[in-house]
Amino acid sequence: MRTIRLQLLAAILPVVRVWAQPHGQAGHSASAPRDSVSAMATGLLTHVAPALSGVSRSEALVTQPMLMLRGVRFGGALQYAAMLNAERWTMPNGEPVAGIWGEGFIDRRHPHSVVHEVMLSATRRVRDGAVSLSAGRGTVPFGTDDPMVRPFTKYPANHHFAQVLERVQLVGAVRITPRVAVEVATFNGDEPAGPTAAPRWSRFGDSHAARLTVWPNTQVEVQGSAASLRSPEFASGEGLDQRKLSASARWTPSSLPLGYLLVEWARTEERYRSRSIIAYGTGLVEALAAHGRWSMSVRAEQTSRPEEKRLLDQFRTARPPTDLTILGITRWQLLTGQLAAALGSGSRWHSTLFAEATRARSTPLLRPVLLDPADVIGGRTAWHLTAGCRLGLGAMPHRVGRYGAAVGGVGTAPHLTMNHP
């Protein structure tokens, strides 16, 4: 394990050292360093009806407590991005979201890793484009933005189909033209075993991903991506592999009231020794509109998920799974709406009060039904009513998951991936 780390470091440092030097171009020779530090946390009260066995429950918790750092040196030739997440302590038992699952949680969103992202990128300009090499732990170039920086408090159910997060990776990116970017990555396939668990370094390089992004104009972004993951559920590498596909289009008008419109499709196929076993699909549409200090967001989603044997805690499943079987497939249809109002802001801080509602409905897709989540929850339809306040310090990122030459596009500030004032 130590040998692999040293080899990776030895391969990256010479590239960083060379690429981080000024190249005699305007903007590279004497640019001052740019750094941004920001923090965010959301306090909320959620009422779920029904939550378990037909009984409703209410929970108060702090979600998405994050510290983020972004910076550039040498006019953008060297970039770093870091994001720390404290959900391990603020919501150790997860956040209620019917339909969501992953990392041993079901119908509750799991707390994310403490080290959510730490990436270093070296970029070199080439005529109208750029090439870069990035390394660290972060978002794999597959699918759409991390929901952590999207307007909704509740995550979409397709979180583990539409993104691949918190992996140790080596990413190469080429900005062919200002309107076309290609990214390729190699990374460890295993999902985090827990918020503080280290990745399996021995598995680095067993999984791969690629993404093509096209910006037809200054308002539209279209991406298509594919990924091959080696045994994400079994850290030992003995589980089913995944083949993933994603396509999305994002429209960000140059003026309000519409902030953005996102349309997304993704498919995950589970395979055993190159043989297809089963596949899951998801489709999602979400939009944000704003006027003055008010904003409204809407998201519609349909996602199929596997049903696994639950533990005594009905919101948990065995991790790693005890076997490779599932007890069914359920289609979830979720409709979420949010109304938010900016309460005020200072030179560096801001706060937002919001109310959010989600209607989640499940339908079994396999017969006979061995496990129906409606029997666990106590109904075919569940409602989540949430109210809370989001507090922020500093300029918050509104696009996360691209590094080096791939940064910059619709609704994205070059280099920092920050929406600076």
Image: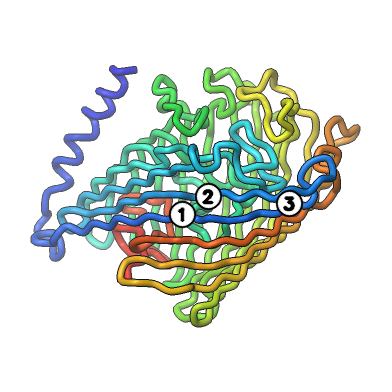
Mark found first going from the N terminus, 3 or 2: 3
Indicate the position of residue 330 as horizontal and vertical percent values: 78, 41
Q: Which mark is residue 337?
A: none
Q: Position of residue 319 (x, y in %)?
A: 61, 25
Report if the CB atoms under discs 1 and 2 are less than 8 Å apart: yes
User: Which residue is disc 3 drawn over?
Assistant: 48
Q: Is 140 situated left or right of 75 in this image?
A: right
What type is the residue that disc 3 sits on? Answer: Val
Secondary element at tag 1: strand
389 vs 124, nearest the viewer? 389
Seen at 74% across and 30% down, the residue is 308
Quarter of the image where one finds residue 234: top right
Q: Residue 151 in the image: x percent, y percent?
A: 53, 62
Spatial separation of the CA atoms under disc 1 and disc 2: 7 Å
> At numbered mark 3, what does the secondary structure look like: helix, strand or loop?
strand
In space, the residues marked 3 and 2 are separated at their CA atoms by: 16 Å
For label 2, the SS is: strand
The one nearer the camera, 82 or 167, is: 82
Residue drawn 25% across the image and 50% down it: 79
Q: Give the quarter of the figure containing the C terminus.
A: bottom left
Mark linked to residue 41? 1
Amino acid type of the residue that numbered disc 2 sits on in the rendered structure: Val
Q: Which residue is mark 2?
A: 62
